[in-house]
Amino acid sequence: MPNLEDVRNQLTTHPSRNYGSHRIEAISYITVHHSATSSGNAQSFANYHVNYNNWPGIGYHFVILRDGTIQWSNSLTTTSYHTGGRNTGNIGICLVGDGQFTDVQIERLITLIQHLKMDLSVPVRRVLGHNEHPDQSTACPSLDMDSIRSQVEAGNGETGTGDETEEGDEDMPVNLPSRTLRRGDHGEEVRRLQEALMDAGLRLNYGADGIFGRETEQAVLRFQREHGLTVDGIAGPETYQRLREVLTDKSDTLHRVQIGAFTDRDNAEELAAELRELGYDVYITSQ
């Protein structure tokens, strides 16, 4: 994309500490920050994060300067520090400024988010300001994020027409798993569950990593407890139904595709995929 300056290999890093990483498929959020300074750039922020915070490197993946230059400061798969408790699968963008930003900065922010949203398949509802994540005590990024999301969805900014964006992101069905999940499971279905739990306000330090471990089980238990469900840590139809109600503010039917004498798992998955494309939430059952 234009106005992008790759500075990833030019920034100060810690002599002995390294950031972890996540899979590109695990990226679930784009988070907007501000620097809380009137000036600065990726190098000055890297110096501060390493020398004062003792971090492995700069916390942000992108820094947008006052003149609109976008500095690419971390690889997309780097799990850097920028949002407490939600760094895995989370891309951090920092605007230089403290609540007062230039028009070109906002334009480039919209453009950058549009590109990331399209390339990483991150829905607009997961484009958040730092202070919109759970358990964050900060005014950052001092922006009207509803307006930012609207502009991203409408296609404003340098991309012009907005053909790259998906219409009606907010009204799309929640992409819930199609089978019962429990501790020890892994894969794409687990990642869907983790994304839904995070969207519902549950904290997952490892993000949507596709592994149903203790952390995911605890999140399911907490969700079940808070919503009056059977508290067993197993994610099934009852939990999915309540998740969808929480995330869409409506209670439609959770449709079932049953495996039986004439429908095997592959056929059921194929039918479920077709139904999801038509807007149905589908759960596969063998009973």
Image (cartoon, grey):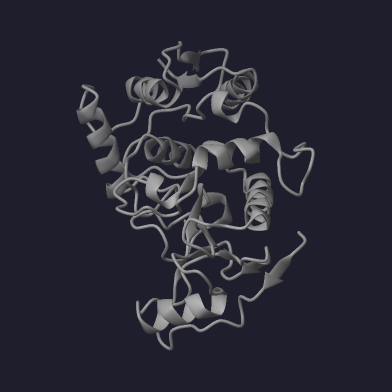
What residue is at 38 percent from the left and 49 percent from the top? 131
Q: In this orientation, which residue lies closer to the viewer: 188 or 8? A: 8
The quadrant of the rendering that contains the C terminus is top left
Residue 41: x and y in percent read: 56, 74
| On screen, residue 109 above or below 67 | above
| On screen, residue 153 above or below 91 | above
Residue 176: x and y in percent read: 47, 29
Residue 17 makes an appearance in the image: no
Residue 196: x and y in percent read: 42, 35
Q: For residue 14, what is the image quadrant?
A: bottom left
Q: Is residue 17 left or right of residue 126?
A: left
What residue is at 51 percent from the left and 51 percent from the top? 26
Residue 65: x and y in percent read: 61, 67
What residue is at 42 percent from the left and 58 percent from the top? 87
Q: Is residue 22 left or right of residue 105?
A: left
- The residue lying furthest to the bottom in this view is 15
Q: In this orientation, which residue lies closer to the viewer: 150 or 18? A: 150
